[in-house]
Amino acid sequence: MNIAEEATKNWGDLPKIFDGGIETLPQLLLYQAQRLGDRTFHRKKDFGIWQRYSFNDVLENVKNFAMGLSALGVKRGETVTMVGENEPELFWSEYAAQAIGAKAVCLYPDFTPAQMEYLLNHSETVVAVCEDQEQVDKVLEIEGKLPLVHHIIYWDDRGMWKYNHPKLLTFKQVQERGKKAIQENPDKFEKEVAAGKGEDPAVISYTSGTTGLPKGCIMTYNNLFDTALRVAGSMPIKPFTQALSYISPAWAAEQMFGVTQGLLTPFVVNFPEEPETVQENLREIGTEAVTFTPRQWESLASLVESKMLDAGPIRRWFFGWGMAVGRKVNLAELEGKKVSLVWRFLYPLAEKLVLHPLRDNLGLQAAYYTQSGGSGMAPDVFRFFHAMGVKLRNVFGTTEMGLFTLHQGETYDLETVGKWMPIHPRFGPPLEYRVSEQGELLVKGGSGFAGYYKNPEATANRMVDGYYSTGDAVYMTEKKEMVYLDRLEDMRKLSTDHSYPPQFIENRLRFSPFIKEVMTLGDEKKPFVSAMINIDMGTVGLWAEQRSIGYTTFTDLSQNPRVRDLIRREVAKVNYFLPEGSKVIRFFNLPKELDPDEDELTRSRKIRRGFLEQKYADFIAATYEGKKEFQARVPVRYQDGRVGTLNATVYINDLETEEKENP
Amino acid sequence: MVRENGYLMRAEAVSLRFGGVIALADVSVNLGRSEILAVIGPNGAGKSCLLNCMNGFYRPQEGRIYFQDLDITRMRSHHIAKLGVARTFQGIQLFPGLSVIDNLLAGRHIYMKTNPVQGFLYRLWTHREEMRERRKVEEIIDFLEIKHIRHALVGALSYGLRKRVDLGRALAMEPKVLLMDEPMAGMNLEEKEDMARFVIDIREAMDIPVVIVEHDMQVVMDIADRIYVLNWGNVIAEGNPESIKRNPEVIQAYLGEERRK
């Protein structure tokens, strides 16, 4: 099946929803409530019980709040800002603001008052909807500097009993005003909703921006629906999927998933009780869909690892064995390889004893739509979840242009960020991309980029010949699959004017069990990339013992020809995912371990680049002079404080020539 | 019910002796309808003894204790509890083998009416009661922000959290007054700040006056409306935090006096 057929099949009847002239989220909410009425839409755990809100309940809450906002004087085109954890009231506030034609802005709950001040003023917010005392306090602190904000609304009244500020109102009070307004003017809500257009700004999503002030990216309804259909066309998603809403709606991804896809598909959107109870909640609701950031998946993986370290030896053995079987079978299937009969035979047992209980405990037993949103998550973390039978996929895109790629189908390469997603013809031409000479990804197609709010200059800077320049450095493999390298500004330039991704190379190399630390070399004065590697004495030593390779010290082991060959192969693996010019050409193994006591590493074990470049200047010089070996003299400080010198012959390895020598 | 002078609870000229040791000597204390009252003093000053007299653990030899104008001096402590006087303890008094929810439900036993026979004969009776009580318990769990540990065994919790559950157990009784014995002892700064916030919230949201015996002067000065200072069984000062801070007798009791040669 080609992509278009696949997409049509996945979409099914879903796009027909738009045939009735639905253009905005509130219009969609009205439609869904009419169609699905009493079916559950939102769920939130309260007083220890999952409380359900049907489409009708949600609509009523949204309607009352929208009319309340209108009664407070919020007008079409103005901005309402929400700040808080993911809770139903936050979603309702957003739909309500949009219902009367206002734009919604969501802020991260951990923003400082100063950050909030800039964003509230830049977005021209007139009403701030806060979760609780914490957020209200922050807004009140800067209230004098917010000339446009005329009301501050909160929904959790804990600790708010003695507050008495003229601008303060509770969520319920606003809804009461709304109810009165509805009695006076019963069809105003429907009229307001009907006036919305697809090209209206629905959300302004502020990008964090590593440099300078945050930019407000306008997301229109077309953008939101376009992206939701891109995902829906890429994989089959069942209606009434149990989804957990956990990533903040301040991040564009949750606007696409929880807010838009949740209403469109629709999902049963579940809100965790507290951030601390997410793990428990995942399990209680039998989560089928969840999107986390790479950091959250990583911490889930390390949670499992650390709990297993606490377990007794028998359990640990079973866990290790079960995961090994899972790796053999699930990862082979993922890569489209054949699995030998032995493993197939063992798999049901591993599933019964280890994998199923593991997924069950993590609350991922029923999960079929699991995503890591963003760019580089370590392939090892993906493998960990795939081994246990969770089909974790990467989704990659930008706030400005929506989502681009997703791991699609049953077999995909974890090193890549996935395949390009289809665009539904209703929302524009298919996505087209180009990789610039600097290695930057340029994209056009779909519903396009609506621009930055009040910043046409920055918008224009982003556009190159009709393409949106993402600022992301990528590489296309021979199979035309995209590998994400780094942000363009984090790339380093070589004397040849070519830029390479130091972080990407170092991170990938560090995943190798044989490599403990690594520093890439290569700057404006050097023509190619090379690497300084600190082998992992434990694993390399074990590897050597198993192969009857004798060694005495770390220095001896690191310079052993077979060990150097082992590391060479590890480097070559990473080179496969690098464009020509970024590949690591030469490397050497350090004859001693990097040590924080000698200021080579920070206390948190990060490499100290500048210091290392100085200390090992003669190593680096030898590497770029093309020497095969050289006599190194390294000053070392012993534990008792004495200073000595380590004399050793260090071999410098060349990937290109040696590849030909030992293929 | 409350007397015209507006005091909810009063101790009048209470004296308590253990053999020859005078723990409390002619101590009079009163608690307003809606205040956070702190009792401070050096070790052995008689602070805990005073609390124990107020909820009937100890019987003072002399003096009277009134709760809402009812003389409770000779009453048994479980009767006093039923009247609405709850307390937390210096050492934690919980069931370590039960979950947080079960501990709080146990705190509500005075409101439970059904007996095992009813439970055996017709489950609906007990079922209704359990739903009602669980709701109350969940409200307390919500109030004290311990949702993430509701099913955890109390014995496995950290000290700070156990203290919070202990407070929850006291609140589960829906008391009219709360007596707290050293709620901040052994806590780190963050736990202390949390606890202080809860004490203030209890007064503000639930409108329950609190008597708090505490060593930590900083906390007391921050949250108390009024303070009594005890030393060797005597009240040596009474007043708002500012006046207590400046009181020379208090400074002397706390910092000691230079010995005269």
Image: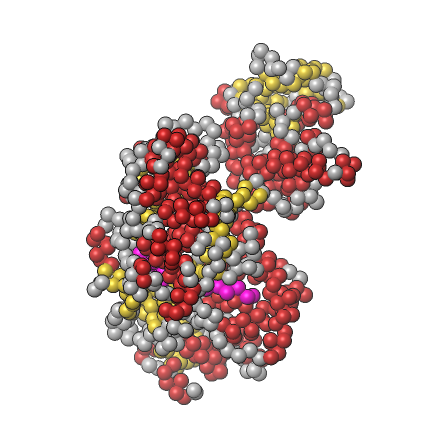
- Residue at the spot x=63%, y=27% of the render? B175
Q: Which residues are magenta?
A: A388-404
Quadrant in which residue B30 is drawn: top right
Q: Residue at x 57, y 14 (%)?
A: B6
Q: Nearer the viewer, residue B138 or A567?
A: B138
Decide: is A455 above or below A60.
below
Q: Is residue A614 above or below residue A629?
A: above
Q: Which image quadrant: the C terminus of chain B?
A: top right
* Observer able to see residue A218: no
**Residue lying furthest top in this view?**
B4
- Find out whether residue B201 is within the magenta segment: no
Residue B226 location (% of width, % of height) = 54, 21
Residue A519 in percent (x, y) is at 39, 69
The image shows residue B5 at horizontal and vertical percentages of: 57, 12
Q: What's the residue at 31%, 59% (across, down)?
A: A427
- A610 sits left or right of A163 in the view: left
Does the magenta segment cover residue A389?
yes
